[in-house]
Each structure stands twice: as C-alpha cells, then as structure tokens.
Image (cartoon, rainbow, N blue to C red):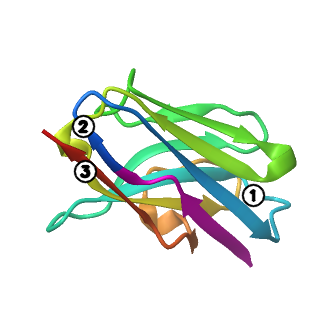
C-alpha cells in the first residue's frame, strides 16, 4: 500500500503561482509513475502531468505545458507541482496519484493510489 498526502493548495490571483507537494509513504519501492490530476466542479477528473519515478521523464497535458512543472525528490519520496501563470480555469481540486507497472499513463483508472486532494482557487 502507498499513502499519498498533498499540500500547498490555496487561493491565488490570476497570473500567480502555487507549489503543490505530494509526500508518499508505505510501499514506495517499485512505484513507476506519479501523476497529478484535477477535478473542477461539475467536471470529470482530468490528467495534468505525470513523472517517471526512476527516469524523471515527464508528460504534460497540453493545457498546462509551459506553465506547470513537475519534479521529484526521491530521498524525500515527494513530488512537487510548480504552477505558474495560473488562470481561473485552473481552479480545481488537485489530486496526487501513484501507480506501479512499467509505463506511465494519463488514464486515472490506471492509478490505484490517490491522495485526499488539495483545493486550488484562482480568482480573476
């Protein structure tokens, strides 16, 4: 089992920045990828970005490319999401997720482990 705890959400004005953190504990050995997803009110949960735990290769949704940056600190078992140039449409609950296996995925159903989510609100 893997436990994930997100932190760092909040309220920011358009154009501002936030950094989210996701700390993993438990059976972290063998995690292949960790990802961030988000869910806005009345919408489905959508993929934002993923990172390979071993290679640090990253995969971004088109909507956040150039604005968001994912990184990881293996020693701390923590993944970070730096969000810059935030827009009102980025407002959502952001979830951290982890999966084992041999490939990354943007399909939320491929991630069995989830954090509780952290709210990000971007005001116009």
**Which residue is found at the position 72% from the left and 73% from the top?**
2
Name the residue tied to disc 2: 13
Name the residue tied to disc 3: 91
Name the main secondary structure of what is drawn in magenta: strand
Residue 49 appears left or right of 120? right
Labelled disc at residue 31:
1
| Place of residue 50 in the rendered image (x, y in percent of width and height, measured from the top left) | 54, 44
Labelled disc at residue 108:
none
Q: Magenta segment: does it hold 3?
A: yes
Q: What element carries label 3?
A: loop
Residue 25 appears left or right of 116? right
Front residue of this view, candidates 6 and 102? 6
Q: Distance between the residues labelled 3 and 1?
A: 28 Å
Total numbered badges shown on the rendered structure: 3
Residue 16, picture quadrant: top left
Using a 10 Å C-alpha cutoff, classify the residue at mark 3 as few (fewer than 14 neighbours), some (14 to 19) or many (20 or more). many
| Place of residue 111 in the rendered image (x, y in percent of width and height, measured from the top left) | 54, 65
The residue at the far bottom in this view is 1
Front residue of this view, candidates 16 and 20? 16
Q: Is mark 1 on a helix, strand or loop?
A: loop
Residue 113, picture quadrant: bottom right
Using a 10 Å C-alpha cutoff, classify the residue at mark 1 as few (fewer than 14 neighbours), some (14 to 19) or many (20 or more). some
> Disc 2 vs disc 3: which is toward the camera?
2
Q: What stretch is highlighted in magenta?
A: 1-10
> Disc 1 vs disc 2: which is toward the camera?
2
Q: How far apart are marks 2 and 3 (CA)?
A: 11 Å
- Closer to the chain start, of discs 1 and 2, is 2
Using a 10 Å C-alpha cutoff, classify the residue at mark 2 as few (fewer than 14 neighbours), some (14 to 19) or many (20 or more). some
């Amino acid at each position: 089992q893997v436990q994930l705890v997100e932190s760092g959400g909040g309220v920011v004005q358009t154009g501002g920045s936030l950094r989210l953190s996701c700390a993993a504990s438990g059976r972290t050995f063998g995690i292949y990828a960790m990802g961030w997803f988000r869910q806005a009110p009345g919408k489905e949960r959508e993929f934002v970005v993923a990172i390979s735990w071993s290679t640090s290769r990253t995969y971004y949704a088109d909507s956040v490319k150039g604005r968001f940056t994912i990184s990881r600190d293996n020693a701390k078992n923590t993944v970070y999401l730096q969000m810059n140039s935030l827009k009102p449409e980025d407002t959502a609950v952001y979830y951290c997720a982890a999966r084992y296996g041999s490939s990354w995925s943007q399909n939320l159903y491929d991630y069995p482990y989830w954090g509780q989510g952290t709210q990000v609100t971007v005001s116009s």
